[in-house]
Amino acid sequence: MRRATAPLVFALLAAVGALAVPSARSASPDLVVSQVFAGGGNTGAPFANDFVELFNRGSTAVDVGGWTVQYASSGSATWQVTTLSGSIAPGRHYLVQLAGGSVGAALPTPDATGASNLAVSGGKVAVARDATPLACGATAGSCASVAAIADLVGYGTAADYEGSGAAPAIDNTTAATRAGDGCVDTDANASDLTAATPAPRNSASPVVTCGATPPPPGGVSQSATVDVDIQSVLSIALERSAVSFGNATTGSTPTPVSERVTVVSNNATGYAVTVHRSAFLPADLPLGVAGTAPAGGQIGPALVGGAIAGIPVAPAADLLVGTTSARSADAGDVWATSLGFTGPLPAVPAGRYTAAVTFTVIGR
């Protein structure tokens, strides 16, 4: 069982108030940029945040402690730095969540977060083996000899890139995506990456195995038994870690606030999502929840037809938000819930009223 809690803050007032330059680096033997999405939160975007997805195409784990993902706009040599941590196993992905907006679904649980706001029109993303901001990228080939760079992707109008040209242009609905499920790296952005529908993967996503080179003619082979112990996956993420209704007056009913719930589960028999809360202090208020189910999900009886239902105060039994009878989508199931009030605010003294709302996902 996994729980995610969003502190709720509510203020109640008494009144309304280029040239083609070949790269000097050879293809990366392990860590590469496998996806770049720059439309996060924009009009029509499928996801609320920009992201960079990394992939270990090698055969050994890569410790990225002290490494960084860096971004610079098309013609700039000034880079924004996002610090990485942990280790990336062979065939595994690593999701770096960046700046975003209000449009689109939440990303799967990121492995690292940063504040870089990627430009849709074009830019440069580099994986660096240290935390020192890069100083190259204003002209084609200027980053080719920088030893700290493990991989570089220039897309769209980028002035620098690997190979003879940048990866294709992307928009609010597409990502620069590496061919072969991330396995292809010929040091040529223009051919290694294409514009495709974004599909962010994190360290919990399934392993991808890159094809091995066949043995030469006349060679000998030996087989090994391979096994894997698949672990259960059950996670929950909230759209907002804090929800505020701002200022309101007694007798009014504030506008509901979106609080989407993203669930990742590999349980073949599905899961259930529930919610409860603590009482508002210094006096309780009639907080409720409404929502719709993702594809394949069933909304709870109290929320059918878009109804808003009061959220029980612990230790009362949780309210059922909904259930599924199968595993989640790879990127997670998004329950489009919102928090609001089931009726006008009661006559209570002016002041700030706070409570905590807890969503829980339970494997079935």
Image (tube, rainbow, N blue to C red):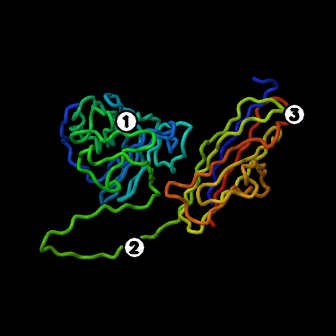
Residue assigned mark 3: 347
Secondary structure under badge 3? loop
Q: Residue furthest right?
A: 347
Marks 2 and 3 in Cβ contact (< 8 Å): no
Query: In this orientation, which residue lies closer to the viewer: 313 or 163?
Result: 163
* Residue 287 x/y as whole percent: 77, 44
Q: CA distance from mark 2 to mark 1?
A: 39 Å
Q: Is residue 23 left or right of residue 205?
A: left
Which residue lies at the image location 39% right of the left edge and 57% below the top edge?
Answer: 92
Q: Is residue 328 above or below residue 70?
A: below
Marks 2 and 1 in Cβ contact (< 8 Å): no
Q: Is residue 267 left or right of residue 85?
A: right
Circle 1 residues within 10 Å: few <14, some 14–19, many ≥20: many
Query: In this orientation, which residue lies closer to the viewer: 207 or 181?
Result: 181
Secondary structure under badge 1? strand
Residue assigned mark 1: 71
Q: Amino acid at mark 2?
A: Asp
